[in-house]
Image (cartoon, helix red, strand yellow):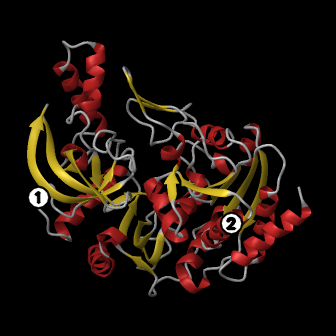
Amino acid sequence: MSVSNYATAEEAILHAMEFSPTDDQAHAAKAVAMLLCSDKPNPTLIINGFAGTGKTTLTKAICSAARQMGFKTSLLAPTGRAAKVLSNTTRLFASTIHRTIFKQYNTEGGRSFPLTQNKQNNTLFIVDEASLIPNGNSSVSQSAASWGSGFLLNDLVEYVFSAPNNRLILIGDPDQLPPIGCDAPPALDPDTLTSLGLTVGRCFLRQIVRQTEGLIIQDATLLRKTINDTDATDLPTLVGADNEQVELLSGESLTEKIESAYSQFGPQNTIIITRSNAAAAKISMGLRQQVMATEECLTRGDLLMVTRNNYLWTRNLPQVGFIANGDIAEVVSVNSFSSLYGLQFADVSVRLLEHDNIDIDCLLLLDTLTADVWLNGNRLKSTAEINEILSNGFEEDYADVSPWKRAIAMHDDPHFNALQARFSYATTCHKAQGGQWQAVFVDASCRQLTDENLQSEARWLYTAATRATERLFLVNYPKADL
């Protein structure tokens, strides 16, 4: 490593910072400079940054410095929402990991997504929200699709370092919820990365730099500290409670506060974070009836969250590729309704809000909007039951054709490939990760707190609270005097 190059890289990062760097940011600048000048194999840097510690400011400075040092940059995130937030905050193009490193192929058995060739050499890859990356099958890999090896972190590493002179930075918050099925985020674990053949460095951003944004970050920090406090016996009393940014609510006042938030920020910039998919679906249904005064099963302006990858309706739109689980769409028009196999469908136009607001026409499977919901004492069809009905009906319709023709039909049949989604006015904490909303309502009611679950409850609340940028509403928070 050239000492002069190292000094130049460090100076370029610090010079590109919008504000005077914290000590932690200055230390991170040194670590990034070492990464850029490293001659070791597969150089990788983990940046562990908590909420409010200036990760975005540092990321922009790193990109600027890397280009000055002769590197190209590629910004990635695990989800479409996280990529959109990253692009908006850095004002640079960002894409999802899946859309960058995999290429779609249609096969007789379905679809496969092997690694594509990495033609980006001499490139610094920066992956934000890396705490969301699983070391196994991601929730995005569903249905008949096979994504790479089935291990997203392994595939990301293989892709990045298959081209010469590349570097990798993984940025994430280790105290957020880990991927489902993981005890800790594998992409932020030095031992895991070292086992994959990487030369790993790590630095931490702990110092809060967003004091001017007020008490949301301060209260989130109190929750985070509880996660790592082995002596903690209860959730913290929040310093920002009941002011212009953080408010503690009872369930009785929830509807009124949501109406106010919709009026001030709009439904697209407001979210309710709850504990389960079924609860989110039921809350969304209630909001449509009580707040939006909507009786129709679907109407223009409804916001949807896709719940299953879809490859049919955007196959002629290479800039989109596919509609991913978790993508948000707005209903532009509802054109007609139909039924098949005892399931209900709507011919609709939707706007893909995380893909430059592109409008597409598609068939929507209406039953998935209310999947798993209990209504008048009866549980509506589950997602699994809906897909079993759909699959059985498809198999009966194509029972007399060859396997190859059946595979072609599987790719082209509009009902089999109908868009599956839920209303997106409420969602789970895992699905909210990587996103930001101006107003966030959190179901803060907890189980009976014990020594065994206190840290997990604090982690869930910390992850949910840090989705808010302007207003945070904690509903039935245990420490509230309501």
Tell me residue 77's x, y (percent).
54, 54
Quadrant showing the N terminus: bottom right
Crowd around label 1: few <14 · some 14–19 · many ≥20 (10 Å): few
Which amino acid lies under the numbered mark 1 shown in the image of this protein? Answer: Glu
Is 75 placed above or below 392 here? Answer: below
Is 1 placed above or below 194 here? Answer: below
Real-space CA distance between mark 1 and mark 2, rounded to the nearest whole angstrom? 49 Å
Can you tell which of label 1 and label 2 is closer to the viewer? 2
Nearer-the-camera pick, 456 or 178: 178
Quadrant showing the C terminus: bottom left
Q: Mark 2 — residue?
A: 62
For the view shown, which residue lies furthest in the right direction?
3
Crowd around label 2: few <14 · some 14–19 · many ≥20 (10 Å): many
User: Residue 423, can we see it?
Assistant: yes
Which amino acid lies under the numbered mark 2 shown in the image of this protein? Answer: Ile
In-image side of 343 versus 10 (left or right): left
Is tag 1's residue or tag 2's residue first in the polypeptide sequence?
2
The answer to which image quadrant residue 68 occupies is: bottom right
Residue 37: mark: none
Q: What residue lies at 44% left-to-right and 87% top-to-bottom?
A: 244
Q: What residue lies at 63% left-to-right and 68% top-to-bottom?
A: 55
SS for dot 1: loop
Is 409 placed above or below 51 here? Answer: above
In-image side of 417 versus 219 (left or right): left
Nearer-the-camera pick, 351 or 188: 351
Q: Mark 1 — residue?
A: 296
Tell me residue 127's x, y (percent).
60, 55
The answer to which image quadrant residue 157 occupies is: top right
Q: What residue lies at 25% left-to-right and 12% top-to-bottom?
A: 402
User: Residue 231, can we see it?
Assistant: no
SS for dot 2: helix
